[in-house]
C-alpha cells in the first residue's frame, strides 16, 4: 500500500476497478484501497424459503445493491403482487435495469427515510427485508413500530477484512492522505477496531472522513469524529463530495 500525497482511502469492499475507485479516478484523484470489510454470500436457504412464499408479503425492501444481487441470484423476475421499495436511487436503478419495477424510493436515502415513507402511506404491511448479517435495527424496528409485520432474512454477510496495518500506519505517519471514504457503518467499525483509537483518530485528523449517508456519519460520530456527508447517498455522490472537499483544502 503506497501512494502519492493527498490520496483518497476507499474502505469499501471493491477492487481497483470498483465503482467508487473508478469515480474517484475519473475526477483525477489518487486512490488507496483499504477494504475494511468483506461482503460474502450467505448459504441462501433462508432467503430462498422466504422468496418461495412471496405471496405472504405485501412489500420487499432493499437497502443495498448487495441485497438486490442476492435476491436476483435466486429469482430473476419480480413476484406478482409484491411491491418493491429501494433505499435510494442507485439501488432502484439496479432493480429497474433487471426489470423489477420500484414502487417506493424515499426522499432521504436511508433506513430512516424508508421508515418515514412507509409512515406516510399508513397501514400495516407485511414486509420482507433481505438484509446484511450486520444490518442496523433502524429499518426493522421502525417499520415494526408503525405496525408492519417485518420478516428480516440474511441475504449476505458483512465481515471484517484483514489489512496491512503496518503499511496503513506508515502512510498515516507520512501525512500522505487527503480523505477517507466510508460507504457503510460496518466499514467505520472495522477500520476503527483494526487501527485502534489512537491511530484511527490520527488518521481522521489528517484525512477528513466522508460518509455516504447519515447512518455512516452517525457511526463515525460514535467514535468521536464528525464526517462530511455526501451530497447524494450514492457512490458517485460520495466521490464528488470527496473531490470538492479536497479542492477546498488545497
Image (cartoon, rainbow, N blue to C red):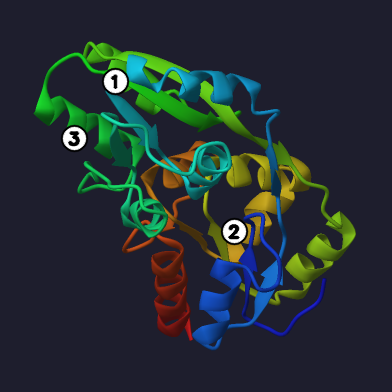
Using the numbered discs, state the Cα–Cα distance from disc 3 to disc 1 in whole angstroms.
10 Å
Residue nearest the viewer, comparing 24 with 48: 48
Residue 37 on image: x %, y %: 69, 46
Which quadrant of the rendered structure holds the N terminus? bottom right
The label number, if any, that marks residue 143 in the structure image: 1
Is residue 135 at all visible to an observer of this figure? no
* Callout 1 secondary element: helix
Q: Would you say 88 lies left or right of 18 here?
A: left
Considering only order in the chain, which callout, 1 or 3, is on the residue closer to the N terminus?
3
Q: Would you say 212 lies left or right of 192 here?
A: left
Q: Quadrant of residue 149?
A: top left
* Callout 2 secondary element: helix
State the residue at coordinates (40%, 78%).
Answer: 244
27 over 81 or under it: above or below: below
Q: Would you say 136 lies left or right of 161 here?
A: left
Considering only order in the chain, which callout, 2 or 3, is on the residue closer to the N terminus?
3
State the residue at coordinates (40%, 70%).
Answer: 241
Residue nearest the viewer, comparing 86 with 145: 86
State the residue at coordinates (52%, 85%).
Answer: 26
Residue 215 on image: x %, y %: 42, 41
Q: Provide the residue designation for mark 2.
A: 204
The label number, if any, that marks residue 117 in the structure image: 3
Q: Quadrant of residue 43?
A: top right
231 over 122 or under it: above or below: below
Considering only order in the chain, which callout, 1 or 2, is on the residue closer to the N terminus?
1
Residue nearest the viewer, comparing 67 with 80: 80
Amino acid at each position: 500500500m503506497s501512494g502519492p500525497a493527498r490520496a483518497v482511502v476507499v474502505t469499501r469492499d471493491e477492487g481497483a476497478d470498483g465503482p467508487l475507485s473508478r469515480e474517484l479516478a475519473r475526477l483525477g484523484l489518487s486512490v488507496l484501497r483499504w477494504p475494511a470489510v468483506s461482503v460474502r454470500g450467505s448459504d441462501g436457504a433462508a432467503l430462498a424459503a422466504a422468496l418461495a412464499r412471496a405471496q405472504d408479503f405485501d412489500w420487499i425492501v432493499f437497502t443495498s445493491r448487495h441485497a438486490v444481487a442476492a435476491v436476483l441470484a435466486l429469482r430473476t423476475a419480480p413476484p406478482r403482487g409484491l411491491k418493491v421499495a429501494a433505499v435510494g436511487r442507485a439501488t432502484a436503478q439496479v432493480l429497474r435495469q433487471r426489470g423489477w419495477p420500484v414502487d417506493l424510493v424515499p426522499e432521504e436515502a436511508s433506513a430512516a427515510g424508508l421508515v418515514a415513507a412507509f409512515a406516510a402511506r399508513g397501514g400495516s404491511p407485511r414486509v420482507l427485508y433481505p438484509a446484511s448479517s450486520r444490518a442496523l435495527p433502524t429499518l426493522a424496528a421502525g417499520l415494526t413500530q408503525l405496525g408492519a409485520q417485518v420478516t428480516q432474512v440474511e441475504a449476505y454477510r458483512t465481515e471484517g477484512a484483514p489489512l496491512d496495518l503496518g503499511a496503513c500506519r506508515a502512510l498515516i505517519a507520512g501525512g500522505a492522505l487527503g480523505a477517507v471514504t466510508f460507504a457503510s457503518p460496518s466499514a467505520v467499525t472495522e477500520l476503527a477496531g483494526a487501527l485502534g483509537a489512537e491511530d484511527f483518530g490520527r488518521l481522521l485528523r489528517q484525512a477528513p472522513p466522508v460518509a455516504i449517508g447519515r447512518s455512516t456519519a452517525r457511526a463515525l460520530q460514535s467514535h468521536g469524529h464528525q464526517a462530511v456527508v455526501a451530497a447524494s447517498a450514492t457512490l458517485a455522490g460520495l466521490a464528488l463530495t470527496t473531490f470538492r472537499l479536497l479542492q477546498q483544502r488545497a
